[in-house]
Image (cartoon, coloured by chain):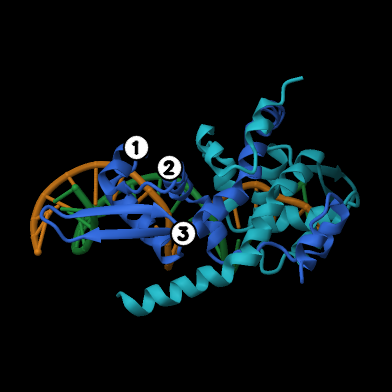
Chain colours: A cyan, B blue, C orange, D green
Amino acid sequence: MNNSVSDRLSENHADMSSFKPLPLNGICTRLGDKWTVLIIWRLNIAGNRRLRFSALKREVEGITQRMLTLTLRRLERDGLVKRHYFPEIPPRVEYEITNLGKSMLHALEAVNLWIRENLPHVEESRRVYDSNER
Amino acid sequence: MNNSVSDRLSENHADMSSFKPLPLNGICTRLGDKWTVLIIWRLNIAGNRRLRFSALKREVEGITQRMLTLTLRRLERDGLVKRHYFPEIPPRVEYEITNLGKSMLHALEAVNLWIRENLPHVEESRRVYDSNER
DNA sequence: CGGAATCCAGTAGGATACTG
DNA sequence: CAGTATCCTACTGGATTCCG
């Protein structure tokens, strides 16, 4: 079986030179936007339970209806979230994270950990930089 | 010794519910911008060798002088990159990735791998979505 | 309830010209 | 060489209103 890619992902930093850079084709941009990670993170916590549109709106702090709709549509389009529509009156719509979405969040765990561990260093560096220069 | 945080980062997906979401405090946004990852990635490949401004400009495809300067300044401010200035004539400036920068790229390896493995699925999902709806 | 449509302000980033 | 300064455009995202 072929796992040459993961083989090259070793502990050895120098081996990273064999990797091409991250393809900045929209996914990376998506990860950096304001709401994507917060929404899919919330859906991931829910696990296999689905969340209604209104529930997400309540629980993702500060998001507007417009941005929630936009972000969910993009997530659905990318296959990271599944949308279940029930044409009742009033309508009911439920959202659920997909396996693909779960795997993406899994890949983000290391980044999450890095931020939690290194944000203080970054902030200290900013303080020093801002006091010296300017 | 205290490693409770990494303890909770297990293989078990359900445990992720105990994590607070990624703090979207500028770093995440930074990762999603157009040039940050490409630049620091290039510096990381160089390892402990430094790269001149002009070398980065040549090798980071399509970047403008302005964006290279801006992005390098932010990376320096965050402590991810070190700037070495030699006041000669003409001036010479060399950039070098820091250990903090290396550790951040290390945390990004899983994301890089995920994209390389799952981008086809995302693109297929987009094709289906765009043909069905609209 | 779950949007869609419209308007608007702020910002990211490109192109270009100038400089110590 | 390694920037800085300026202008300009496109896009992101907030606020608000309307709708089935």
Residue topped by disc 2: B42
Q: Which of the marked residues, 1 or 2, is nearer the chain's N terminus?
A: 2
Task: State the separation of the CA atoms marked 3 and 2.
Answer: 13 Å
Q: Secondary structure at mark 1?
A: helix
Chain letter for mark 2: B
Identity of the amino acid at label 2?
Arg
**How many other residues sit within 10 Å of disc 3, few (<14), some (14-19) or many (≥20)?**
many
Chain letter for mark 3: B
- Label 1 with label 2: CB-CB less than 8 Å: yes
Residue at 76% across, 42% down: A103
Q: Quadrant of residue B82?
A: bottom left
Residue A33 in percent (x, y) is at 57, 54
Residue situated furthest top in the rendering: A1
Q: Is residue B134 left or right of residue B70?
A: right
Task: State the separation of the CA atoms marked 1 and 3.
Answer: 19 Å
Residue at 63% across, 59% down: A114
- Label 1 with label 3: CB-CB less than 8 Å: no
Q: Secondary structure at mark 3?
A: loop
Q: Which of the marked residues, 1 or 3, is nearer the chain's N terminus?
A: 1
The residue closer to the viewer here, D14 or B14, is: B14
Q: Secondary structure at mark 2?
A: helix
Give the vertical position of B122 relative to B111 (above or below): above
Residue topped by disc 3: B80
Residue C6 in percent (x, y) is at 52, 53
**How many other residues sit within 10 Å of disc 2, few (<14), some (14-19) or many (≥20)?**
some
The residue closer to the viewer here, B29 or A57, is: B29
Identity of the amino acid at label 1?
Glu
Chain letter for mark 1: B
Residue D6 in percent (x, y) is at 19, 61
Identity of the amino acid at label 3?
Leu
